[in-house]
Image (cartoon, rainbow, N blue to C red):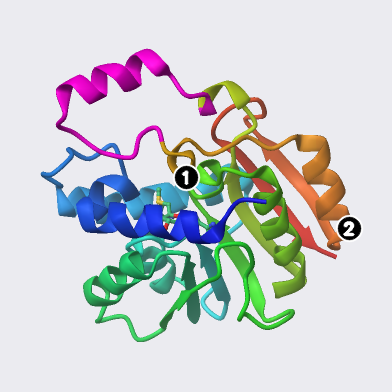
Amino acid sequence: MADAGQMRRFWDERAREDPWYFVDNRLAYGNPDVQAFWAGGERDLDAILDALGVSVEPGDAVVDVGCGLGRLSRALAARAARVRAIDVSGEMLARARELNAHLSNVEWIEGDGVSLRPLEDAGADALVSHVVFQHIPDPEVTLGYVAEMGRVLRPGGWAAFQVSTDPRIHRRRPLAAFARRLRRSGPRGQDDAAWLGSAIDLDRLRAVAAGAGLALERVENPGTQFTLVLARSR
Ligand SMILES: C[S@@+](CC[C@H](N)C(=O)[O-])C[C@H]1O[C@@H](n2cnc3c(N)ncnc32)[C@H](O)[C@@H]1O
């Protein structure tokens, strides 16, 4: 089982280094286009919901797992009644709170890195997670989060989330790491297990989901780093 402390330390360090880049590495390192960052949150949320054929309703209580700076939480807050945004990194959350101080319907929660505690059972209508589980070094932790989704969703509630199902993406590349060390500039932590992450096995995902009372309604882009899953609580 991955060490939650290691994930927390890694993401706290990245939040101090350049939170914008490490939340969305399509941005320029050290020189973020902040407007593009927030616009990207709306776009990425729409892309997930459209691909999976679900929508957030005005009365919904929604959970954002691995919220980072609240890129998707902000977009969710405009559509839902209430958002609980959870992350393992207190440093990310401190910045998220400051950047989104104008949002009155978002609660920022420092999680334990392996579960959705302290969220209550069956209290959520919907759950979203974007580019989080791909970074988790141990697939068992990701599967543990899936079991937790079954706990926190109300019957009929849904979870729309990304996982990697391509193990090749997560291998260390010694030559690239060597070139990075020579350059000495640019983003750090690229060879850390908490950045490289892991892929999950879809059969295991189905089994864990079923055990947690979730039906996997859609699995899009299997075999890729960006497999999209729609799970619904029975
Ligand atoms: C690449 S960022 C994505 C942030 C956000 N979902 C977005 O798309 O804007 C990954 C986030 O996942 C969080 N994270 C990483 N491991 C986690 C874990 N085990 N539990 C909860 N959050 C985690 C990190 O702290 C970071 O904020």
- In the image, farthest residue toward the left: 31
Q: Say left or right for 184 vs 80.
A: left
In the figure, 148 relative to 220: above or below?
Answer: below
Residue positioned 49% across, 39% down in the render: 193
Q: Nearer the viewer, mark 2 or mark 1?
A: 1
Residue at label 1?
194
- Amino acid on which the number 2 mark rests in the picture: Gly
In the image, 52 versus 96, the foreground residue is: 96
The relative height of residue 113 versus residue 123 in the rendered view (above or below) is above
Inspect the magenta stretch and tell me whether residue 199 lies in it. Answer: no
- Dot 2 corresponds to which residue? 211
Whole-percent x, y for residue 195 in the image: 43, 41
Query: Looking at the rendering, which quadrant does residue 13 occupy?
Result: bottom left
Q: Residue at x 71, y 57 (%)?
A: 144
What residue range appears in magenta?
170-191
**Residue shown at 61%/51% (left/top)?**
2
| Residue 202 falls in image quadrant | top right
The amino acid at mark 1 is: Ala
| Mark 2 secondary-structure assignment | helix
Asked whether, in this view, residue 104 is left or right of residue 225, the answer is left
What is the C-alpha distance between the residues marked 2 and 1? 27 Å
Spot the residue most to the top.
175
Residue occupying image coordinates x 25% and y 17%: 179
Q: Position of residue 9 (x, y in %)?
A: 39, 58
Q: Which mark is residue 222?
A: none
Residue 30 lies left or right of residue 209; in this view the side is left
Residue 93, above or below 218? below
Which secondary structure lies at badge 1? helix
The reply to whether residue 80 is in sight is no
